[in-house]
Amino acid sequence: MPEAASATRATIGDSEFDRDTAVTRRAPGVYDIDLSAGWTIISAVNGGYLLAVLGRALADALPHPDPFTISAHYLTASQPGPAVIRTDVVRTGRTLSTGQASLFQYDEQGAEVERIRVLASYGDLDSLPDDVRTTATPPAFPPMDECFGPEDGPAPVDGSSAITERLMLKLDPSTLGWALGVPSGKGEMRSWFGLADGRDADPLSLLLAVDALPPTAFEIGLKGWVPTVELTVHVRCRPAPGPLRVTITTRNLAGGFLEEDAEVWDSADRLVAQSRQLARVRLG
C-alpha cells in the first residue's frame, strides 16, 4: 500500500468509514445519523458515502446482510449534519429480501426535506456458488508507484475536497490529462482505490468506491460539479483483501446529462461490483 495508508491498518468495523456510516436505531425502521463533513466535495456530501449510509441502515432492517443491487435517486443535495433514515421492508424471501429507504434532513424553516431515496435487494454473498462464466477481463493498470494521487497535485482549497484525505487514490496517468490542462477527450477514469487508514474493502465500501473518482467529465474537457441524478450498484462478490482497481467510462453526453459505467476489481482479479449512474453536467 502507498504512503497514504496509515502504519497501523484499520480493520473492518473499526475504521473511520465504519464510524462515519454508523446509524443509530431510534425505532423499528427509523435510524439517526450525523453525516460527517469528512466525506464532502466542496460542501456537498459524496453520493457514494450516502449510499453506504443507507446501505448500512438497510442491512440492519432486512434479514439478509449484503447488498446485491441498490438503486438510488438523489433528490436534493445532502449537507453535513443530522439526518434521519426511514426504511420499509418490501418483501422477504429465502435468498433475497427487498427494502426501500429514504434519508431526510431539515431546511432552515425546520421542514423535513427528502435527500435521497433507494430501493435495494439484499442477500448473503457467502452463500453464492463459485461458478463464474464471463467475458469481462481485469483492467491493465500501471503499478501503483507509477500512478498519481491528490497529494501529487497542488494543495486544494481548505474544505474543498475533504473526502480525498480519507481515500487512497492512485490514478492512471493516461486519464490525468485534465489535471494538466490537456484533457484527452475520452470519457475515462481509472484508479487504484482504498481507504486511507488501510481498511480492506467490504460490500458497503464498494458502494463508496463506484462514486469516489474524479468525474469522467473532466477528461472530456468539462469543469465543475457533476451531481448524480441516479446511481445503481450491483455487488457481485465479497472483495479479497488488498487495493481495488476502479474503471469508469462515459460514452454519451447529451442534453447536459452523461452516464458513467464503473467496474470494480479486487486483488484476486475478480469483478466485485458494477454500477451505472446518470449525472448532470454544466455546459459552456
Image (cartoon, helix red, strand yellow):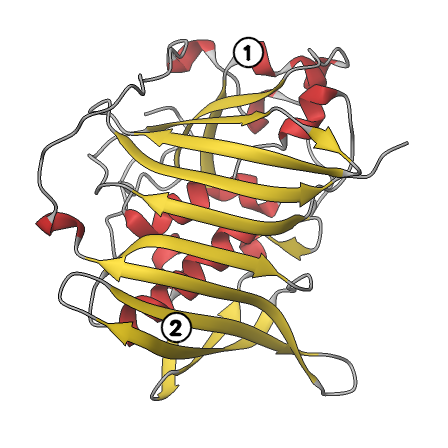
Mark 1 burial class by Cα count in 10 Å: few <14, some 14-19, many 20+: some
User: Mark 1 and mark 2 in contact (Cβ < 8 Å)?
Assistant: no
- State the count of labels: 2
The amino acid pointed to by label 2 is Val
Q: Position of residue 246 (x, y in %)?
A: 42, 28
Q: Is residue 120 left or right of residue 223?
A: left
Q: Residue at x 24, y 27 (%)?
A: 270
Hey, which quadrant is residue 254 in on the image?
Answer: top right
Q: Is residue 52 above or below residue 218?
A: below
Residue marked by disc 1: 173
Q: Residue at x 65, y 15 (%)?
A: 186
Check the picture and name the quadrant holding the N terminus. top left
Residue marked by disc 2: 23
The amino acid pointed to by label 1 is Pro
Q: Position of residue 6 (x, y in %)?
A: 35, 37
Q: Secondary structure at mark 2?
A: loop
Q: Secondary structure at mark 1?
A: helix
Q: Residue at x 44, y 64 (%)?
A: 119
Q: Which mark is residue 261?
A: none
Q: Is residue 164 left or right of residue 183?
A: left
Q: Is residue 191 above or below residue 224?
A: above
Q: Is residue 108 above or below residue 157?
A: below
Query: Which one is earlier in the sequence, the residue at label 2 or at label 1?
Result: 2
* 107 or 253: nearer the viewer: 253
Check the picture and name the quadrant holding the C terminus. top right
Mark 2 burial class by Cα count in 10 Å: few <14, some 14-19, many 20+: many
